[in-house]
């Protein structure tokens, strides 16, 4: 089995069709995967860090918000954000390597289209917002070297959301 970079991937015995080096990991702060926190006075960083000695090829990030009264102009079901969230890649020294929003922020559900194009689904009724951000659709994977991290920074009060989570999907390999 090979991926778009033509690397040969091993498989697991239990699931011979799946690469053994898949990574499915939530972005986390120090204690939780839930990003419905108050980051207004002190921003809260949610991240996935490439393990020591590893390289991670990130192909997709899925985000999910649950709340009532979701509309395109809101963030989930709360009012459009004042400051907004950022999405960046940084190295182990916290130096910014890439700002996916080019200095801008996401303040409402519609603006997730800046990352995900049309792969943003705003639900109805018992509302949800599902964002499928496929980096491979932009021409390839995001490569995180050992210690690099993908960060979503919450800079507003999101405690009014029922749930807000992000999961990274990719392949991890030895960094040699």
Image (tube, rainbow, N blue to C red):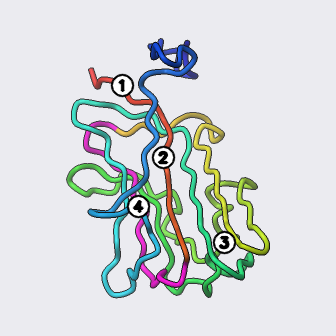
Q: Position of residue 35 (x, y in %)?
A: 44, 69
Q: Nearer the viewer, mark 1 or mark 4?
A: 4
Height in image: 1 above or below 87? above
The residue at 41%/77% (across/down) is 37
Quarter the C terminus occupies? top left
Q: Mark 1 points at which residue?
A: 173
Q: Which of marks 3 and 4 is nearer the N terminus?
A: 4
Q: Where is residue 29 in the image (x, y as percent from the top left)?
A: 32, 63
Quarter the N terminus occupies? top right
Q: Earlier in the sequence, mark 3 or mark 1?
A: 3
Q: Name the residue under label 3.
A: 109
Q: Name the residue under label 4.
A: 33
Q: How far apart are marks 2 and 3 (CA)?
A: 19 Å
| Residue located farthest toward the front when viewing the structure as drawn | 14
Q: Mark 2 points at which residue?
A: 168
Height in image: 145 above or below 61? above
Give the secondary structure at mark 3.
helix
Q: How far apart are marks 4 and 2 (CA)?
A: 12 Å
């Amino acid at each position: 089995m090979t991926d778009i970079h033509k690397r040969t991937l091993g498989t697991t015995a239990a699931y011979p069709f799946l690469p053994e080096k898949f990574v499915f990991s939530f972005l986390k702060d120090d204690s939780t995967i839930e990003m419905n926190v108050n980051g207004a006075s002190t921003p809260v960083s949610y991240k996935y860090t490439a393990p020591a000695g590893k390289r991670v090829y990130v192909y997709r990030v899925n985000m999910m918000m649950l709340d009532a009264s979701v509309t395109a102009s809101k963030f989930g079901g709360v009012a459009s954000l004042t400051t907004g969230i950022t999405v960046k890649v940084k190295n182990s020294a916290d130096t910014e390597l890439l700002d996916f929003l080019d200095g801008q922020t996401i303040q409402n559900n519609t603006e997730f289209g800046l990352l995900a194009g049309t792969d943003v689904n705003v639900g109805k009724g018992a509302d949800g917002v599902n964002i499928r951000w496929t980096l491979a659709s932009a021409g390839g994977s995001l490569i995180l070297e050992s210690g690099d991290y993908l960060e979503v920074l919450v800079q507003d009060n999101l405690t009014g959301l029922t749930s807000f989570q992000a999961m990274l999907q990719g392949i991890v390999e030895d960094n040699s």
